[in-house]
Amino acid sequence: MSTDRSNRLLNPSAKDKLNQLKMECAADLGRLDFVKENNDHYKGDLTSKQNGSEGGPIGGEMVKRMIRMQMENMKF
């Protein structure tokens, strides 16, 4: 069994929509400073705990919204 994993999008044309969703979530959470597109400085000196607490809520909110959107699409 292969353990080859990647972060490639299944639909490359969705990249812009995902970036838009990320920016919306970050804005709603008041965390635009922690989005890579707005703040692309070196972060290697930060702990993983600090990076996770700053950017993690953005990804979590993205997942919640994507699940909510999919559930709405599944309703008959």
Image: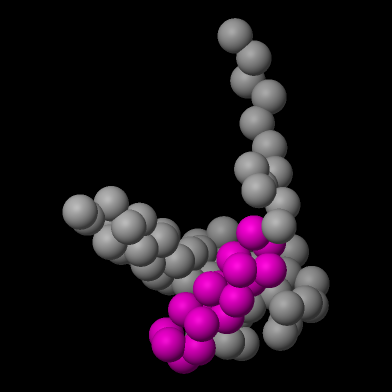
Residue 17 is one of the magenta-drawn residues:
yes
Q: Residue furthest front?
A: 76
How many labels, in total?
0
Q: In the picture, which quadrant includes the C terminus?
A: bottom left
| Residue 63 left/right relative to 40 | left
What kind of secondary structure does the magenta stretch mostly adopt? helix
Residue 67 visible to an observer of this rendering? no
Quarter assignment of residue 36: bottom right
Q: Which of 29/24 is in front?
A: 24
Say which residue appears at 43% left-offset and 87% top-offset: 28
Q: In the picture, which quadrant includes the N terminus?
A: top right
Q: Position of residue 23 (x, y in %)?
A: 57, 80
| Residue 20 left/right relative to 39 | left
Q: Residue furthest top?
A: 1
Q: Where is residue 20 in the image (x, y as percent from the top left)?
A: 60, 76
What range is drawn magenta here? 14-30
Say which residue appears at 66% left-offset and 48% top-offset: 11
Q: Position of residue 26 (x, y in %)?
A: 51, 81
| Residue 47 left/right relative to 58 | right
Residue 4 visible to an observer of this rendering? yes
